[in-house]
Amino acid sequence: ESVEVQIEDQEFQLEPDNELRFEVENKNETVVLELKTGLAEIFGTELVKGKSYTFYFGAKIAVFTWQGCSLKLRGKKGISYISKETPMMFYLNCHASLEQLRVKSEKEKTRGPVTMVVGPTDVGKSTLCRILLNYSARMNALGRRPIYVDLDPGQGQISVPGTIGAVMVERPAEVEESFSQAAPLVYHYGHTNMSINSTLYNTLISRMAEVIHQRMDENPRINCSGLIINTCGWVKGKGYQHLTHIALAFEVDVILVLDQERLYNELVRDMPVFVKVVLLPKSGGVVERSNKFRLEGREARIREFFYGTPRNVLHPHTCEVRFSDIKVYRIGAPPIPNTLMPLDMQKTDLETKLEPVTPGPNMMHHVLALSFSTMVEEDVVRTSVAGFVCVTNVDTSRQMLTLLSPQPKPLPETIYLMSDVQFMDNNA
Ligand code: ATP
């Protein structure tokens, strides 16, 4: 029998402008945090005094205080430490400048600040986006409704990996959760790496920008609140070209560059003069993530889509469909040697071509996106998706697929888009 070692509670006193940093490093560890006195926030969300916040494996947390506070940690095994050096003042100033632009656009009935956050991997891009969104949502008297746009298909923060998405932010994120996911706008890309199909990626970016601009035009409140766009950490060569394409498509006004002077200088050189490019320091607290951790993060994201979180458990369903009853496609045809390429066809046409997929073992474990288009005659590639299922079994003798679905409802008769992204459902 193993003996549970009782870990003592730890108390921390934080001076103004300090932050307490800790990680949950072990699979079965949970860490509980409580604010005892003063005021504190986690990535822009205020903590409620006396409330217990629970964190699970993989969480990397900074509790920041502008005014000073005392905190209690329960269950933390490894190290946690207080840092006096944080870039929070810079981030708050960014927020203040964006807020000025919002006030101005509210008066002039023009579009509010479209902000793009860029930088190499592990510099805290997602965290900065979260802080800026939370700060604007906290000023609820002003009724800000910024849209969060996540263009990194590797993480799939808004939906699942292999997608890009956008969601309107009405209130600060819950401390332990991501932003509320009501009616997100999601596009299926089908890969976690942008280099696999750049043409498709750029096509989706342009389309998404078009749709979001349209929504802004229709709603003055969203319009003056602007956008916060999170990008992927690939900033060299073609990755840089993607960034400039995003800037152009979304008509960005502000680019926040985290940590990299070279990227900052390139953008200053290449962007039109009215685009404000700002170099910001990264936080020393941002934790580098190994490839293994990223992979696990992706899997956890998909598991969360189907099974929820410990705080909000979901019960997915499995259902069977006949091979002949489901229309599955993938976007992008395999390359054809130049000599065989029809004269009127471009390589880029192939990359955005809708290709039927014959159901079979090749679909095992793949995520399928449910398109809002129901017919191939529609513009399926540039249409957003309604949800996802995952293939958990392929029975060739009975010609049946087993699908994991978040909803008990019969699967809609629509177009299913097969993703490269796979998910092993070991709960089933
Ligand atoms: P990627 O390039 O993969 O998109 P990123 O630049 O967006 O990464 P984040 O996801 O923002 O980086 O941060 C990486 C990790 O560091 C996250 O788990 C985040 O919670 C953690 N983190 C960010 N800031 C701090 C901090 N000040 N103290 C401790 N951990 C932090």
Image (spheres, helix red, strand yellow):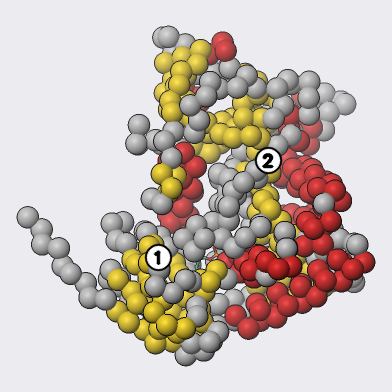
Residue at mark 1: 53
Query: Visible in this render: residue 180?
Result: yes
Residue at mark 2: 187
- Percent across and percent down for residue 116 are 73, 63
The part of the image, by quadrant, that contains residue 203 is: top right
Is the residue marked by circle 2 packed among few (<14), some (14-19), or many (20+) residues within 10 Å?
A: many
Give the residue drawn at x 52%, y 24%.
409
Q: Locate residue 257 relative to residue 59 in the image: left or right.
A: right
* SS type, badge 2: strand
Give the residue drawn at x 33%, y 66%.
31
Q: Is residue 324 above or below residue 418?
A: above
Q: Locate residue 194 relative to residue 41 in the image: left or right.
A: right
Type of residue at label 2? Answer: Tyr
Query: From this viewpoint, which residue is outermost toward the left?
Result: 1
Is the residue marked by circle 1 packed among few (<14), some (14-19), or many (20+) residues within 10 Å?
A: some
- Percent across and percent down for residue 176 are 46, 60
Give the residue drawn at x 82%, y 33%.
346
Type of residue at label 1? Answer: Tyr
The part of the image, by quadrant, that contains residue 293 is: bottom left
Quadrant (top left, top right, bottom left, bottom right) of the N terminus = bottom left
Q: Locate residue 422 relative to residue 340 in the image: left or right.
A: left
Using the numbered discs, state the Cα–Cα distance from disc 1 to disc 2 in whole angstroms. Answer: 33 Å
Q: Locate residue 137 relative to residue 177 in the image: left or right.
A: right
Foreground pick, 209 / 31: 31
